[in-house]
Image (tube, rainbow, N blue to C red):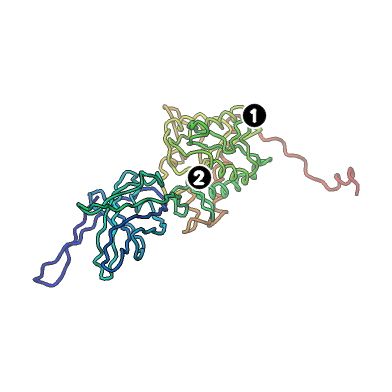
Amino acid sequence: SPLLFIPTIGIPGKKCGTIILSAEELGNCRDYATMQFCANKLDKKDFFGKSDPFMVFYRSNEDGTYTICHKTEVVKSTLNPVWQSFSIPVRALCNGDYERTIKVEVYDWDRDGSHDFIGEFTTSYKELCRGQSQLNVYESGPLFYFFPLQVSLLSFIVEQDYIFISTSLHYMNPYQMNAYAMALKAVGEIIQDYDSDKMFPALGFGAKLPPDGRVSHEFPLNGNVENPYCNGMEGILEAYHQSLKTVQLYGPTNFAPVVNHVARYAAAEQDGSQYFVLLIITDGVISDMAQTKEAIVNAAKLPMSIIIVGVGQAEFDAMVELDGDDIRISSRGKLAERDIVQFVPFRDYMDRTGNHVLSMARLAKDVLAEIPDQLISYMKSKSIKPNPVPPAYSPADHSQTNPV
């Protein structure tokens, strides 16, 4: 634990003490422990009565010292107290270290504050988790004391604390959409109108899948390998939220498998009848940059474009490089035939709270900025000409065949 010594400033000529601050990094454990204790045959400390016992719990620090983390209430005039149950964050009790020593002292309360020591014992979170048993009956007392105190654990329950602010961009807040869902909804609603049936295959990458924990970088969000299609943006959002409950997010973060997945579909439709747009929503982390570059270079000759939307506050240097606006992307000395990637940092379109899109019009403009030119460049590279313009609609002609 880092120590900070702060000399106190007092009256000149008088010796002053030193304040010592000790810091320790908090663990990630968010659990709460609820426990209850009782004691039997405590030492009688009051001359005209019994004892007024209470317990003091200490967390052990990394430097070997102890810090008070909880005091029970005082139970008046008894040698066999049953203290009320209490809840305490596990971080306060042992900082999430299940093996760390927890010291407990028992005192007889005195009005003047000079509480009489009855006894002490040590335990650990791991031992307390065993619950009520002979293993959690503790006997101790002052040196040479013939009848030691006996303290027993009556109950021990661990509960997970769900009320906290998660740093994960995938955290599902019950009151608002997370960053991924907001980006998916906002951008998805812009591009979905260019698809006739509104049925979209939605894939995730970077997770362990049930039941065997296999790591996958192109798994269907709806869990259906045979039919990964979702009905509109609402269907994709529902599949996304359900997948967060069933898969375990896991690295590395590989883009290439998803790019190649879409490229296989595009390779089968090169006659100009279909054009594919891959939307990737990412926090900017990428583990297979070289493989992704190669996949994009290979996909540049196919009827497809890639829109990358960055969420969160990380640096997106790698995504800017994939965009290729300044320097055309290349792999193994081979230059991409076309620029098919458009990168958009979603945070640039959000308000200060990060909860609302400031301008859907500006977002739509920037998301779609390069798609028309990318589509036309593909059609020209394959010498594919537009279909003839259909004849103009004529109400007169229509009325002749369909009289009212």
Q: Which mark is residue 297?
A: none
Left-right relation of 300 to 387: left
The mark that comes first in sequence, 2 or 1, is 1
Q: Is residue 258 visible?
A: no
Q: Secondary structure at mark 2?
A: strand
The location of residue 129, given as percent across then percent down, is 39, 45
What residue type is disc 1 on? Asp
The location of residue 153, given as percent across then percent down, is 38, 50
Which one is closest to the eye, mark 2 or mark 1? 2
Determine the image quadrant of residue 236.
top right
In this rendering, the count of numbered labels is: 2
Label 1 belongs to which residue?
271
| Residue drawn at 25 percent across, 70 percent down | 112
Residue found at the very far bottom of the displayed protein: 11
> Around disc 2, counting alpha carbons within 10 Å, would you say few (fewer than 14), some (14 to 19), or many (20 or more)?
many
Front residue of 192 and 146: 146
The location of residue 215, given as percent across then percent down, is 48, 32
Left-right relation of 52 to 158: left
Front residue of 364 and 28: 28
Q: Is residue 50 visible?
A: yes
Front residue of 285 and 51: 51
With respect to residue 386, does 19 lie above or below? below
What residue type is disc 2 on? Val
> Around disc 1, counting alpha carbons within 10 Å, would you say few (fewer than 14), some (14 to 19), or many (20 or more)?
few
Left-right relation of 121 to 327: left
| Residue drawn at 86 percent across, 47 percent down | 396
Label 2 belongs to which residue?
309
| Residue drawn at 51 percent across, 34 percent down | 209
Contact check, label 2 and label 1, Cβ < 8 Å: no
How far is disc 2 from disc 1 in space, using C-alphas?
A: 29 Å
With respect to residue 49, does 64 lie above or below? above
Determine the image quadrant of residue 98.
top left
